[in-house]
Amino acid sequence: MHLKVCRTLSLCLLALLSTTAFAQSRTATTNTNFFSAWENRVRATLARQPSFPIPVIAPSSQMVQLFRFDYVHEYTPARTATDIYTNGKGLNIIPWANTEIDIDLPPYIQHNNPKVKDGAGDFTTVIKFRPFASPDKHHDYSLGGQLIISVPTGSYKNGALVSTYTPTLMGGKGFGPFAIQSTLGGVLPKSDASAIGRTITWNTTAQARVGKIFWPELEVNSNYYHEGPNNGKNQTFLSPGFMVSKINFRHTPGNRLALIFGSGFQIATSKFHSYNHAYVFTSRFAF
């Protein structure tokens, strides 16, 4: 009897160990397949688009998978300086083919003015879809669109009063070492549009490749206001800058780990402007 019990227990233990080992092996295989499929999808999506980088300031139809941190130093007409950390940038991922989702960190705004309280701005997320693209050696273009959704999480009046939606059309075309990118969108408040106003945004960027990774650029960033406190006004900045894209950490086939960074200087050219000029620095870690 004792021998039968031991044998039964041994068989049960062996079955349990086998089941556990099989489950762990299956889980590891599933995880490996998941990440391998993700990596392959990202590589395929990036391979179908041109190599010109996303500009320092303006959005782009280009797909990216990276973490981004921006810093802006503005000078206002009242001769005060405002520092903006993250500038509403964060994590960009490519979960599906030709699709990008951005989860942006609320910017932290430091006014350097005792009369104005510092605080966080609004939380935003971006859904981008790029259905048409061709790499450098073919037609060298990219066309797509995105929707920015903002939530009024700002503290001490450092954000909007209501949620906003910003649909945007985007495109870019390469001409050898040169590239032109442009976007057209509209900031639409969820409610109180007559009091808050709507804004049309238009950005155009001219870029040129110098060497392998250096991209000097010139941006024109414009806002046109309809209704609200700035009804009928427009604000335009001329923004020279450069991008370094990209410095690879490892020179192996298929490796995407890289550092991308750049800087620009915004100069107000319109009569109406909320700030005179601004220094912009952007850093991006691609993975």
Image (cartoon, rainbow, N blue to C red):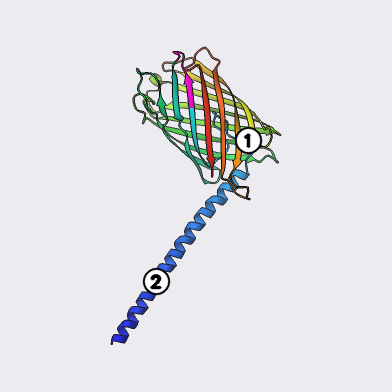
Q: Position of residue 135 (x, y in %)?
A: 66, 41
Q: Secondary structure at mark 2?
A: helix
Q: Which residue is mark 2?
A: 17
Chain part drawn in magenta: 72-79
Q: Earlier in the sequence, mark 1 or mark 2?
A: 2
Q: Nearer the viewer, residue 228 or 282?
A: 282
Amino acid type indicated by mark 1: Phe
What is the quadrant of residue 174 in the picture? top right
Amino acid type indicated by mark 2: Leu
Horizontal arrangement in the rendering, residue 90 relative to residue 182 (left or right):
left
Residue depicted at x 53% and y 32%: 282
Label total for image? 2
What is the quadrant of residue 120 in the picture? top left
What is the quadrant of residue 243 in the picture? top right
Residue depicted at x 55% and y 23%: 265
Q: Residues within 10 Å of mark 2 (few under 14, many from 20)?
A: few
